[in-house]
Amino acid sequence: MAPGSALIPRLMDLSPGTEALRYCFALPARPESVAVARQMTRARLDEWRLDDDAHDAAILIVSELVTNAVVHTASSRVVCELRCLDNRLRIAVQDQGHQPGGPRLCRSADDEHGRGLLLVDAMCSAWGSRDAGNGSGRIVWAELPHGSERSC
């Protein structure tokens, strides 16, 4: 699937007077897709005009979550969704694999893996994971508050 081909409507109406910006893309679960995910996220957040701090944190979070999906699951693709609503940016990455127990923070400095989630934990206001349902993988999400020229 080509980058961006899973694009869903950018603007969706949630309830009268409430709108959310939403962007979704699918990429092959390969190491080179991490850089593509960063580029696609950067381009969309530039369009949404998020403040610099949230913009940079979101790109790093996408990078870490997509890297985890590529490295720690047996997925053939990953799907990333960005949703901007009520001055919050929600990032979700779905893989097709299954990591028993889901992602875990590794606080030991000697661990080679797991430091990415420590970064995610430090940069966002909340994060977590859940099964995607029907054995179709796992969704890991993170949420960031932000300011923007446009009220998301």
Image (spheres, helix red, strand yellow):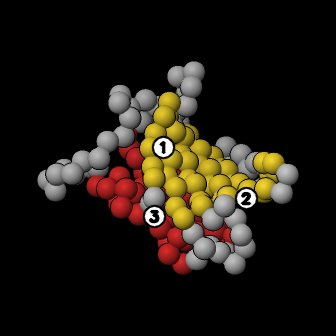
Numbered disc 2: secondary structure: strand
Q: Which residue is mark 1?
A: 140
Residue 6, position as x, y percentages in the image: 71, 46
Q: Quadrant of the N terminus?
A: top right
| Dot 1 or dot 3, earlier in sequence | 3
Tell me the amino acid under the disc marked 1: Val
Q: Which residue is mark 2?
A: 21
Residue 86, position as x, y percentages in the image: 66, 61
Front-most of residues 48 and 44: 48
Q: Nearer the viewer, mark 3 or mark 2?
A: 2
**Residue at position x 78%, y 57% from top?**
19
Sort mark 2 into few (<14), some (14-19) or many (20+) by Cα contacts within 10 Å: some
Front-most of residues 37 and 24: 24
**Residue at position x 74%, y 50% from top?**
7
Q: Quadrant of the C terminus?
A: bottom right
State left or right for residue 115 relative to residue 139. left
**Residue at position x 62%, y 50% from top?**
81
Q: CA distance from mark 3 to mark 2?
A: 20 Å
**Residue at position x 46%, y 31% from top?**
97
Label of residue 60 in the image: 3
Residue 40, position as x, y percentages in the image: 62, 62
Instruction: State the image quarter where residue 70 is shown.
Output: top left
Do labels 1 and 3 touch, CB within 8 Å?
A: no
Residue 142, position as x, y percentages in the image: 49, 52
Label of residue 90 in the image: none
